Image (cartoon, grey):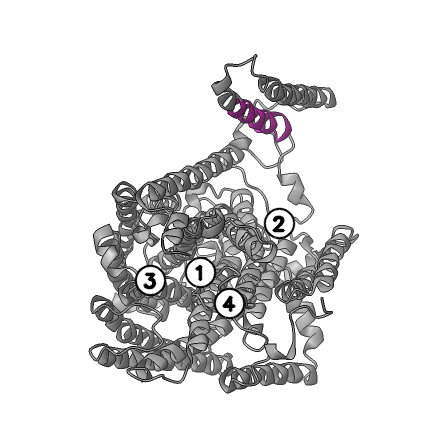
Amino acid sequence: MTLLGRLTWQAIPFHEPLPLFSGLGVLITVVAILAWVVAKGYVPYLWREWITSVDHKRIGVMYCILASVMLLRGFIDAIMMRTQQVMAYDAPGFLPPSHFDQVFSAHGTIMIFFVAMPFVIGLMNLVVPLQLGVRDVAFPTLNSVSFWLTAAGALLVNLSLVIGEFDRMGWLPYPPLSELRYSPGVGVDYYCWSLQISGVGTLMTGINFVTTILKLRAPGMHYTRMPMFCWTALASNLLIVAAFPVLTATLAMLLLDRYVGFHFFTDTAGGNSMMFMNLIWAWGHPEVYILALPAFGIYSEVVSTFSCKPLFGYRSMIYATMAICIISFMVWLHHFFTMGAGADVNSIFGIASMIIAVPTGVKIFNWLFTMYGGYVRFRTPMLWSIGFIVTFAIGGLTGVLLAVPPADFQLHNSLFLVAHFHNVIIGAVIFGAFAGYTYWFPKAFGFVLDERLGKWAFWLWLIGFWVAWGPGYVLGLEGMTRRLQHYDVAEWHPWLVVAEGGVVIILLGIIAQIAQIVVSVRTREQRRDVTGDPWDGRNLEWATASPPPAFNFAVLPDVTDQEPYWDMKARAREIGQLTRPEPRYEPIHMPRNSPTGFVTAFLAVVTGFALIWHIWWLVLLGLAGAYATFVVFAWRDHDEELIPAEEVARIDRANRAARSAALQHRQLRRETQRESAE
Amino acid sequence: MSSNREDFDEFDLGSHVGEEHVAGEAPPGARHPTLGSELRSYIIGLALAAALTAASFWSLDEHVIYGPGIVMALIVFGLAQVGVHLVFFLHLTTSPDNTNNALALAFGVLIVSLVFFGSIWVMSHMNQNMMPARALLEMRGG
């Protein structure tokens, strides 16, 4: 046993130029950014206002930034795979098999765990407390720990690029291939430990948000007055609490197999490798809805706001959401119909998979009927929503097709399947994340994103998606299986060239999104959201300033309607002044910032890295450090800060004045219009 | 009635969740527990839990219960133990402010049963239909 365990210089890929130089490039970029931050003297500001922040809005923004950076990484993987498959017709291509396998595994892992999850959780963080009309989540410091643990997992995955290797058997490491005998390297360990660490963070987020939504709501906000996004967030977090322990337990069993010679999944010694498939999908299918439900909530908010109408069928939407929440736990076998559980089992799970399409269909009709007869404004978030409805309906149909076991036996593991899940995950989750990002960006930062570039990004993404994944369906029907490093079927080649073209179009879409941020930041003074309500919104997040003060609401709003802010606005417009007279301002206690999350996550990275490389002394050191951090946090004397009443008054008066002015302006305009009409 | 509101009070996060009753006020009909009544409930719980534990060991004696019924008896004692813990130690009641806890328990039981019994059902069907992996490996000469 050596001091550094399995870690030697051989872990650094000196003989493979591609990972070495891409790794070096990333390293140089990160060092350059850090150097720039230090040189500009931003470190104290970042530490005080962001890294140690327990403010749900800041944490939400950091989640979204993490997701966006990881989206770029995952997208680079996608370009590499598509390019390899264009080049590898009767040729070796530019990626050797071992590298290609790591690329598709990393792509899937990153896109699900470190893009889709953090984006969705980030938007929930930003919006749910505001929509509920409260000041923060139930456990603010825990929230910070959750975020930093997710970031720790992402860091470990990316570390595998330079030190060692990543898992080579896809985004779910199926045994027996993932067992020690067939995968002796560190790839599977990188996968397992990064997901165990980020999984703890996700589970704590789930607990935090379930508690927040059930226990912290503005006075008068009954369950049937909660905005649809809060309902879907509740369902999603219930699923997190129920499903993530299954993932943790399954990966723990695989780790026990690999580290201490257990035989949960080794067929030769009394284990059962199919049990891994069964358990991982018992988590994996709910996971699909953990991602999709909040996206459905975003569409509900956006469609209703930009159709200038209340959401059609609010109660049926709640029933549909909760039905999906339960049924999502009854369909997991459709991911492995071909395992051989027989016709009885397959037909029951097939029928359940078709049934879950019913509440989803209810939702689609509700969005359509919300638009029907409404005054639809085609702003960027609305475009993403309409693009979603069309794309997702098709993706859902191919899903129902795959739910038919005999059809699935033909299409299992083909590109048809891959096209289907990209169709629903990009079409629902990623489009939803972008709709929510554009919709709530002014709330988070106080200025509206550039509309023209936003529309460019939308059309490039939509067209790019269909050009990239339309051919996938054809290829699947032509018999092409997934994850092929090279092939010799001439008919496939043209379709793969078309798919590569689609990826290029999506790349242009991403460039448009980056340009949108740059242009919007530069011209932010012209695009300020002064009133805090840029879209004529309907829920409480628009009742406070943009960006909201740390305490969100000077006085908690009184909810008397299903659309609380629309109700307030309607009454204010009737009487021509704000509904509430200026309240008596009181000092507000807010939780104090804490470095606990950051320190814990740093120690989690150390522990995870040490576990991967079998550096046992460092494991003990990391765990002891994390426990010490917890002890220091638990024994803190000073855990909250007081925002004085004068400060609260100053901030709230400014917002009241802006809203009053907007109201007067509107009345004035109405009167002029009426006079000119007469 | 110790409502959860008090736990959040120090942060003043705005925890005025109350469907009908005003925050801070106990729901109508709720009794305020005294030290004596709480102590009594814990002692009853402890006694029941200990009795159930003792009963499981006692039932193992083959002369007491019909032999093949022992497993069933142990399951019953185990479930009763869960119930005792929930009622006396985790304070699950039927009062209105406990609806969330009851629903959370119901949801948890539902999901655990789905995954647990579902897995057993799926895997037993697979074992019936497919050659066991070990036999397959041996047949291949592995």
**Residue type highlighted by circle 4:** Cys
Image position, residue A459 (x, y; %): 30, 76
Q: Which is more N-terminal, label 3 or label 4?
A: 4
Query: In the rendered view of the protein, which quadrant contains the N terminus of chain A?
Result: bottom right
* Label number found at residue B13: 2
Q: Spatial distance from mark 3 to mark 2, Cα to Cα?
A: 40 Å
Residue A82 higher or lower than B58, as above or below? below
The verdict on a common chain for dots 4 and 2 is no
Image position, residue A184 (x, y; %): 54, 66
Q: Chain of mark 2?
A: B
Q: Chain of mark 3?
A: A
Q: Spatial distance from mark 3 to mark 1, Cα to Cα?
A: 15 Å
Give the foreground label among 3 and 1.
1
Q: Quadrant of residue A478?
A: bottom left
The verdict on a common chain for dots 3 and 1 is yes
Give the foreground label among 4 and 2.
4
Q: Quadrant of residue A455?
A: bottom left
In this view of the protein, can residue A549 be seen by the observer? no
Q: Which is more N-terminal, label 1 or label 3?
A: 1
Q: Identify the magenta region.
A: B74-92
In this view of the protein, can residue A484 be seen by the observer? yes
Circle 4 residue: A64
Please, what secondary structure does the residue beneath circle 3 have? helix
Circle 1 residue: A172
Residue B134 higher or lower than A605, as above or below? above
Q: Nearer the viewer, residue A582 or B107?
A: B107
